[in-house]
Image (cartoon, coloured by chain):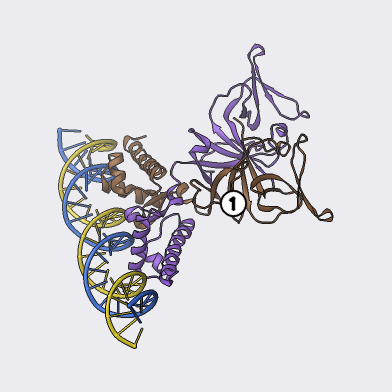
Chain colours: A purple, B brown, C yellow, D blue
Amino acid sequence: MRVSQEKMTANADAIENCIDEYYEENGISPSIEVIAAETGISKSTVGRYLQKLTAEGRLISNGRRGYATKQMQQQTGLISVPILGNIACGAPIFADGTVKEYVRLPASLLGSGSYFILTTSGDSMIDAGIDDGDTVIVKQQDYAEVGDIVVALVGDDATLKRYYPEPERKRIRLQPENENHEPIYVRECLIQGIAVTVWKNLK
Amino acid sequence: MRVSQEKMTANADAIENCIDEYYEENGISPSIEVIAAETGISKSTVGRYLQKLTAEGRLISNGRRGYATKQMQQQTGLISVPILGNIACGAPIFADGTVKEYVRLPASLLGSGSYFILTTSGDSMIDAGIDDGDTVIVKQQDYAEVGDIVVALVGDDATLKRYYPEPERKRIRLQPENENHEPIYVRECLIQGIAVTVWKNLK
DNA sequence: TAGAAAATAGAAAATTTGTTCTTTTCTCTG
DNA sequence: CAGAGAAAAGAACAAATTTTCTATTTTCTA
């Protein structure tokens, strides 16, 4: 292989990496000037490479919003999911302004709707595969089907249980999935959402 | 409350929403012109609102890269994780160019390192909480500790098992977590990574 | 080694984009 | 109903950023 060829791809890779890294850090595409400064390549050469890479389909031009790598652009169709506190805590879950962190997850993994994330504490749902410290993705809705795992507000406490309405006895059974725990019976409870995914840390 | 006040916050909300939606779709911030066209508010008024919202801390200005909402900006510190195929398939896992989809996950949830995502099939790890169809996040590394759940390449097949080296017998035991399955014994195996997180669909 | 081709660098041009300024419209109060 | 104040609209402005052009350097081949 010729040296020029090697240098060409080396420059192209350096530029592509630079875009990714800058984006990783700043959340926006770097300007050509920044890329030039970062890689040590001249502005015009960087520009030429960007056009070439775009023509090859490796990059996408967003006009004056800069160039994006494919994996950057691929983050369209993402849903913002707020990471809320612990499910055991008694405080109301949807206190606005307290949300500090978001995850953006692909809509294809979740489906449509509004979601939030909780971390669990306690062992009451251990037989459903939800252990202490696991992360639960909850679909926000105010109803549930029989047997769904719901986030329910009982008094001031939020709890994670299976939902079994018993209309004939005018009560709702909130069933833990742990033989050592007794079910909770309530007249009414506010359903905040249903658990759709558990995130278990193995290691 | 006065009408003007209501309209003010209404406009502000409309602008903020517009930014989010546009970003959701295009991966970049909309220009003031686009926001104006989309919301029906004039360019200069949109600009004034953007400055006001930035002063209030609700938006972040990225100069000519546009304005970002906080939850957009908050996606720095994310790791790109490729979604690879099914763990049961025999094909080599790291065939380049075949990766079509990426998820960007917060580094705080994963820690440093390189990761990839697999979906499982089969029931061999059912007792470890990994069921058929679950999604596994794998940390890419070529070694493992005793008892780790590894993605191992045995011959041409990738498999997910617990890792128990038995040096005194000069073999490695790959242990399923299902009493109906027998362990696999191999001389050597190529470790591709260790499972760190399982993503279980409850609903 | 010399010449041709390719790649690069530096500067100028063109375009997009946010900002500012002035005029107009709307709203509330006396 | 009239006037003051705020909010919005439209046009002009200024700055940033990509694109283009030309000269220079580097690299490969005969």
Q: Residue at x 45, y 56 (%)?
A: A23
Which amino acid type is marked by label 1?
A: Tyr
Residue under label 1: B115
Position in image of residue C19 (x %, y %): 30, 56
Position in image of residue B20 (x %, y %): 41, 43
Q: Secondary structure at mark 1?
A: strand
**Of B171 and A103, the residue lying toward us:** B171
Q: Where, quadrant-wise, is the C terminus of chain B in this rendering?
A: top right
Sort mark 1 into few (<14), some (14-19) or many (20+) by Cα contacts within 10 Å.
many
Q: Would you place residue A168 above or below residue B133 in this image?
A: above
Is residue A38 something one can see in this rendering?
no
Q: Residue at x 63, y 41 (%)?
A: B88
Residue farthest right in this picture: B168
On the picture, is B19 further left or further right than A202?
Answer: left
Position in image of residue B172 (x %, y %): 77, 51
Q: Where, quadrant-wise, is the N terminus of chain B in this rendering?
A: top left
**Of B143 and A33, the residue lying toward us:** B143
Residue farthest top in this picture: A168
On the picture, is B11 further left or further right than B139?
Answer: left
Position in image of residue B8 (x %, y %): 34, 40
Q: Chain of mark 1?
A: B
Is residue B113 something one can see in this rendering?
yes
Quadrant hosting residue B170: bottom right
**Of B51 and B20, the residue lying toward us:** B20
Q: How many marks?
A: 1
**Of A154 and B89, the residue lying toward us:** B89
Q: Would you place residue A119 above or below residue A49 in this image?
A: above
Q: Residue at x 68, y 44 (%)?
A: B160
On the picture, is A194 further left or further right than D8?
Answer: right
Quadrant hosting residue A169: top right
